[in-house]
Image (cartoon, rainbow, N blue to C red):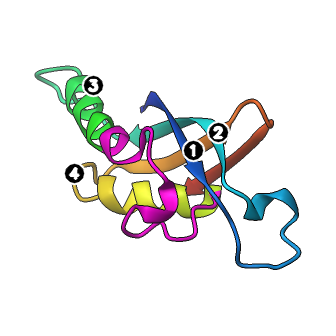
Amino acid sequence: MRIVKSTTFDAAHYLDHDPQARPYARLHGHSFVMEVEIVGDPDPETGWVVDFGDVEEALSNLREKLDHRLLNEVEGLERPTLENICRWAAVRLQPTFPGLKAVKVSRPSNGETCIHEL
């Protein structure tokens, strides 16, 4: 089975690694959607792959570190591309959820998504 839980956050960033980085080098913000997928067999007693409450708590902890922040100042996200945000989240979630299958981060207003599969 596969369960999916998502959260949203709004944050600013800049990507100044390339002098020709178009408008990305300037400070700008996005609304993000982060979705996590966890796979496993449901526990025979509870019927759950994992407790959605535990996933909610873990996502709330990540959201607290990201929401209304300058992502470049978040430890481990000095270059906050979608790819790096996915990897950053996966590293923090995987110890708690060994069945973590994927982290997906989207910017719906831009039609852009990155999926980090584990």
Q: Can residue 93 be seen in this view?
A: yes
- Of callouts 1 and 4, which one flags the residue occurring earlier in the amino acid sequence? 4
Res 63 quadrant in image: top left
Q: Report the residue marked by disc 4.
A: 96
- Magenta span of residues: 62-81
| Residue located at (33% from left, 45% from top) | 62
Cα–Cα gap, marks 1 and 3: 17 Å
Q: Report the residue marked by disc 2.
A: 30
User: Eyeballing the image, is 40 above or below 49?
Assistant: below
Q: Can residue 118 be seen in this view?
A: no
Res 50 quadrant in image: top left
Q: What residue type is labelled 3?
A: Phe
Q: What residue type is labelled 4?
A: Thr
Cα–Cα gap, marks 2 and 4: 28 Å
Who is closer to the viewer here, 102 or 49?
Answer: 102
Secondary structure at numbered mark 3: helix
Cα–Cα gap, marks 1 and 4: 17 Å
Mark whose residue sits in front, 3 or 2: 2
Mark whose residue sits in front, 1 or 2: 2
